[in-house]
Image: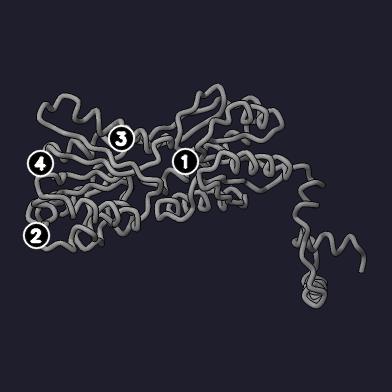
Amino acid sequence: MSSGTVSNFLNRPDKVAPETSARIRAAVRELGYVGNGAARQLRVGESTTIAHLALEVGTPSFSDFAKGIEERATEAGYSVLTANSTGSVERETSYLDLFESQRVRGILLSAVGSHDQRIVKLADRGIPTVVVGKRVDTSTCSSVSIDDVAGGQLAVEHLQKIGRRRIAVVGGPFDIETVADRLDGARRALAHVRDAKLDVAETTDRTITVGRCIGEEIRRRPKADRPDGIFAVNDLLAIGILHALLEEPSIRVPEDIAIVGYDDIEFAADAVIPLTSVRRQSELLGRTALDLLHQDMSRGATTKHQRVVFQPELVVRRSTLPAATAS
């Protein structure tokens, strides 16, 4: 059997007779052959791998975002390689070096650091980048994000409208742009409310465990020193706070302390007291990011970059309103 026939089986199977295909397939199984995708990419001159550099991969909102990316990538014939920077600028730089050396087709970048110059250099080498979650000049690249300032404002305006005046914002680190924007929105919401007080509890992480620690600290305070409204910058923090507060029978949610989260993850509606949350449609964000990248990859140097910003929405549940009035 000629090498050309085997090559056709591997790359153009429609050109090989069924009987011949069956013989080659049996030989492939017996030999344990695995195709070399990297070699093939070098041969055809174009990669089919998209790199996704994520800020944190362990959250439910990331899972929804990744689902949107994978859905669109599969439709377009790309595979996705995901790396986790854990918020380290050094790791971001290292992974960008790796992606460039591997000649990926394009990059989806969720980053803490500013990599504008690197993004331009990557584009010059034929590797376009779409920035996710940050506002970027369209002269540099395309980007997709949520208006997190508006989201933070929605959350705290809601607390203010239901009569809460001692409001705590819980989250961090605030050197992450999306988290800082949510705090900015909270401050804007109360800028003209004279009798309101805003306290900020900055955290180094945004997990249920950290939320529980914050909730326990609030629970131990004298009643007069507790906030009557809490805005947590993600749902995991909010759920941790909720669980800790409910361990004190004298604290009622929402009657004594109302809680708003952010992201509207699946667990928000199923919390022991369903959580009011700001919905950010992470899956749609992922699909749009891949669409923008595919567009930039298809058009090459002639592409006109876009900035897409989605507006969040508030989903009201029992953690801020009694069951009879919550939607």
The residue tagged 1 is 288
Q: Residues within 10 Å of mark 2 (few under 14, many from 20)?
A: few
- Mark 3 or mark 2: which comes first in sequence? 3
Q: Residues within 10 Å of mark 3 (few under 14, many from 20)?
A: many
- Looking at the rendered image, the disc whose residue lies closer to the viewer, 4 or 1, is 4
Q: Residue furthest right?
A: 2
Left or right: 168 as drawn, with respect to 124: left
Q: Secondary structure at mark 2?
A: loop
Is tag 4's residue or tag 2's residue first in the polypeptide sequence?
4
* Label of residue 309 in the image: none
- Which structural element holds mark 1? helix
Q: Is residue 58 above or below residue 190?
A: below
Query: Which quarter of the image is occupied by the N terminus?
Result: bottom right
Q: Secondary structure at mark 3?
A: helix
Which circle's residue, 4 or 1, is located before the other in the chain?
A: 4
What residue did someone put label 2 on?
250
Residue 270 position in % (x across, y down): 25, 62
What's the residue at 80%, 78% (across, down)?
30
Residue beneath disc 3: 183
Q: Amino acid at mark 1?
A: Thr
Residue 290 versus residue 11: which sits nearer the camera? 290
Nearer to us: label 4 or label 3: 3
Q: Label 2 amino acid?
A: Ser
What's the CA distance linking mark 4 and mark 1? Answer: 35 Å
Residue 64, position in %: x, y? 42, 53
Real-space CA distance between mark 4 and mark 2, rounded to the nearest whole angstrom: 21 Å
Residue 59, position in %: x, y?
Answer: 42, 54
Q: Which mark is residue 162?
A: 4
